[in-house]
Amino acid sequence: MIDFSSVSECLQTSLRTVVKKIQNQERINNNEALVLYNESPLSLLGSLANDIRERIHGDKTFFNKNIHIEPTNICVFDCKFCAYSRKLSKKEEAWEFSQEEMIQQILDHEDSEITEVHIVGGVHPKMGLDYFVSLISEVKKIRPNIHVKAFTAVELEYMCRKAKVSYKEGLQILKDAGQGSLPGGGAEIFDKKTRDKICEDKCTSEEWLEMHETAHSIGMPSNATILYGHIETPEIIIDHLSRLRNLQDKTNGFNAFIPLKFRNGNNQMSDIKEGSIINDLRMFAFSRIYLDNFPHIKSYWPMIGKKTTQNLLAFGVDDIDGTIHDTTKIYSMAGAEDQNPTMNSEEIIELITSVGRKAVERDTVYNIIKEY
Ligand code: V47
Ligand code: SF4
């Protein structure tokens, strides 16, 4: 955890000075970030974030055409916020797709011009590196041009450990099989004390960061996330973002940062109230301002909802992910409003253009496919 002990320096830093720095396009340090987070009214945060978003992207708002494959929800780990995983020993409500079933899910979308398949799931003790190499190879056989964005650092750490290979070796094997990039999941909260309270038994923060650094070093880009709106404090949010900003300075391998709002349905943290939309707007706007080296801030609409996503387009967000096609369960099982998340391209374009932004279809690595 970073040191916020220089409180006197922090108190002397006025909000006005911090705002000036941001407007002059200077990087803010962590104490300044704390002042901004704690003292800035929402309207100011929003307007600063929107200025940055428009400076980088204008009105462009990116989306892609993708599907999710969730191979299994059986998981060896026990994250307290997870509504989705089941133990191998407790098979009710568990699923485990065969390779043929997963390939069929892609074939079912043959006509929908999807450019990305996003593969993530529980950490199944019997699905290892070889299993996923074979899955990716089969995917690439039937759709050679599709981008495979797959496996959180949590899944990858387990896969490499079980296969007794280094992160670099494991990632290179997956890359050779056709994996193009990593999604941002599993980051949760890097602060150790907080991480231990919500997801003690999975990969550590250091391992998560090392996995992404290694991926970047062999030419696999990735995304990053934070799970916010539960027991974290502003200091803990800044600590998390600071570790990401430092790594991005080193590798420049992150594409998008995705704040994930904690949903409290059907999990071991259901006693914690979900945050307000004001908290969401603040979190996204703050991220846009602090993460000055991240090209994109993404609102993942199946999790946060379509209306909030529209609002977020004025609070720093320039990307809303994909069409999804009702292929993810991770948020619906945790209580997200949309129980069957799906939007076709026309609906996504309408969502974006009806709030005065320009819809742009992209591929996974942000090559523009079509502007609307
Ligand atoms: O790591 C699980 C989160 C993540 C809950 O990179 C929850 O493009 C809120 O990272 N409330 C996995 N969040 C999903 C993910 C993701 C999704 C879409 C796009 C990308 C990308 C990445 O889902 C987990 C965890 O942080 N999660 N349960 C919950 N109850
Ligand atoms: Fe497993 Fe992921 Fe759920 Fe944690 S969040 S229990 S690692 S499926």
Image (cartoon, rainbow, N blue to C red):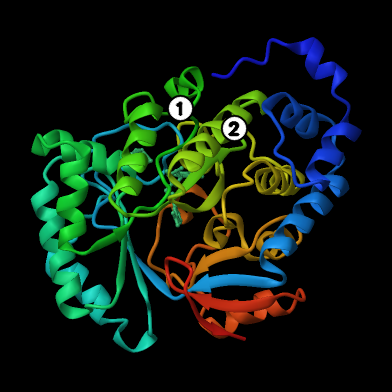
Secondary element at tag 2: loop
Circle 2 Cα neighbour tier, 10 Å, few/some/many (<14 / 14–19 / ≥20):
some
Residue at image x 72%, y 24%?
Answer: 31
The vertical placement of 87 against 300, above or below, is above
Residue at image x 68%, y 10%?
Answer: 5
**Residue 165 lies in what quarter of the image?**
top left
Would residue 316 be visible to someone looking at this image?
A: yes
Q: Closer to the camera, 359 or 124? A: 359
Residue at image x 74%, y 27%?
Answer: 34
The vertical placement of 161 against 262, above or below, is above
- Residue 337 at what x, y percent from top left? 58, 58
Q: Amino acid at mark 1?
A: Ile
Outermost residue, bottom side: 111
Q: Amino acid at mark 2?
A: His
Q: Looking at the image, do the residues carrying marks 1 and 2 touch, with CB atoms under 8 Å apart?
A: yes
The quadrant of the image that shows the N terminus is: top right
**Residue 306 lies in what quarter of the image?**
bottom right
Would residue 98 be visible to someone looking at this image?
A: no
Disc 1 and disc 2: Cα gap in Å?
10 Å
- Residue 286 at what x, y percent from top left? 71, 43
Query: Which residue corresponds to mark 2?
Result: 230
Secondary element at tag 1: helix
The vertical placement of 132 against 274, above or below, is below
The vertical placement of 121 against 105, above or below, is above
Q: Closer to the camera, 312 or 11? A: 11
Residue at image x 70%, y 79%?
Answer: 353
Does the beta carbon of the residue at mark 1 sit less than 8 Å from ligand 2? no
Query: Which residue corresponds to mark 1?
Result: 198
